[in-house]
Image: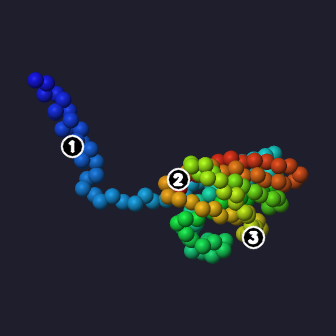
Amino acid sequence: MNIFKPVATLTLLLLIAGCSGNQTPQPAVFVTPAESSSDFGDLRVHYNALPTASLGDAVARDYGVQKDSGTGMLVIALRQLADGNEVAAQGDVSAVVHDLQGVRQQVGFRTVKTGDYIDHLGTFQISPRNTYRFEVTVKSGGRTEVVKFQRSF
């Protein structure tokens, strides 16, 4: 009789049972991803996507966005690089968002002035525990550049 198999099974079950430490399950907490940027010569494109529900009240008010668990926000900021500094850059922004099921959303943007800068802000529909792929097209200074990235919410 091989006693190893039942002992190994019992040990595995005890280890799995001990993982929770008798704590009740906690909901996942959203962690804001680090803002990202891409440089195209002297043009820097900052981009970020996050759920509007994660915005602070003052930020939501300043951006004119409703906080909602079913809405994501895409922020694109165009900056001209001059002597190591960033200054506001003019341009047009468009974007397409795809989720894991292949559902495609065109994002409409509006501009929001934040201090000396102009941000391009758009919203899109999100669902929990989904990953979104973004393709952002920027037209600025007579050129067209594309930024691709993804975020999970």
What is the tally of numbered marks visible in this picture? 3
Label number found at residue 130:
2
Amino acid type at mark 3: Lys
Residue at image location 20% in from the left, 33% down from the top: 8
**Residue 37 in sight here:** no
Residue 123, position as x, y percentages in the image: 65, 64
Residue furthest to the left = 1
Amino acid type at mark 2: Asn
Amino acid type at mark 1: Leu
Label 3 vs 1, first from the N-terminus? 1
Residue linked to disc 1 = 14
Residue at image location 36% in from the left, 60% down from the top: 26
Closest to the observer, 125 or 66: 125
Real-space Cα separation, disc 1 to disc 2, in angstroms: 32 Å
- Cβ atoms at labels 3 and 2 below 8 Å apart: no
Going by the image, does 76 lie left or right of 125? right
Closest to the observer, 123 or 36: 123
Q: In the image, which is nearer the foreground, mark 1 or mark 2? A: 2
Q: How crowded is the residue under tag 2: few (<14 C-alpha within 10 Å), some, or many (20+)? A: few
Q: Quadrant of the N terminus?
A: top left
Going by the image, does 24 lie left or right of 111? left
Residue 54, above or below 37: below
Label 1 vs 2, first from the N-terminus? 1
Residue linked to disc 3 = 113
Real-space Cα separation, disc 3 to disc 2, in angstroms: 30 Å
